Image (cartoon, helix red, strand yellow):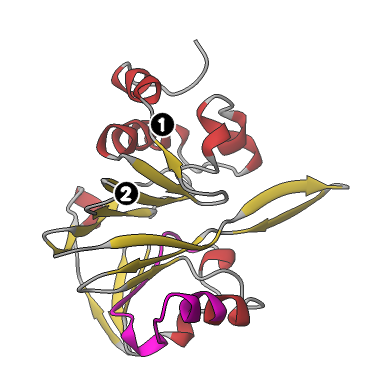
Amino acid sequence: MSYSVHVLQAGYSRLEEGVMRANCTCTLVKGPATLIVDTLTAWDKEVVMAGLAREGVACDDVKYAIGTHGHSDHLGNLNLFTAATHIVGFTVCHKDQFFLHPFETGEPYKIDECVQVIPTPGHTTADVSVVVKTAQQGTVVIAGDLFEREEDILDPSLWRHTAGSENPEAQEKHRCEVVLLGDHIVPGHGPMFRVTEAMKEMARKGKLGPP
């Protein structure tokens, strides 16, 4: 089975005159089970639709619509994907059917041999990340706000304080696990970045950041 990962829009977050301006990174996973991960704000329907059109994907082609956590900038257009199973944080549902899955015990939700949804709490208590094995990009982890953007590897204040963390200890742990797992990471508010050996070396020591 062949998958590929496509960032439809890279997110951002910045303070402007005391106001936080932010939108998430929206990502499409093309393959046997097409996924969309984090669907921007409710004001971005046309952005999502244009991104799908560029990739030749219709809303009804999407099998899983995923919100990595329950913040509004990640969930605004889930209603476009009514043919899909929705996963929002630790909740899995389709229409009015809710399916129990033990994310709380660390159990991945396996879509197929190449795609799984793993629990990565920290930013909130119910964050998830999507792990995709691809032929061209290696293992890509779509991590939501587990990572704010690539710069927070060396500036932890970006994820600890600018973005906020409900459980910094858990978030630090899962950040290291994801760096060791992935070849590329799609963060919550920035473009996809490559995981370097220097990042992996920090993760092996249990903490990402400056020496």
Image quarter where the N terminus lies is bottom left
Residue 175: quarter of image: top left
| Residue at the image position 48 percent from the left and 42 percent from the top | 147
Q: Residues within 10 Å of mark 1 (few under 14, many from 20)?
A: many
Label 2 sits on a secondary structure element that is: strand
How far across and how far down the image is residue 142, in percent?
Answer: 38, 53
- Which range is magenta? 50-70
Residue 151 lies in quadrant? top right
Residue drawn at point x = 61 percent, y = 71 percent: 41
Residue in the picture at 24% in, 54% down? 134
Q: Please name the amino acid that badge 2 sits on.
A: Val
Q: For numbered disc 1, what is the local secondary structure? A: helix
The residue that disc 1 covers is: 172
Q: Is residue 64 magenta?
A: yes
Q: Is residue 121 above or below residue 209?
A: below
139 and 100: which one is in front? 139
Question: Separation of disc 1 and disc 2 at Cα?
Answer: 19 Å
- The answer to whether residue 108 is magenta is no
The residue located at (44%, 24%) in the rendering is: 208
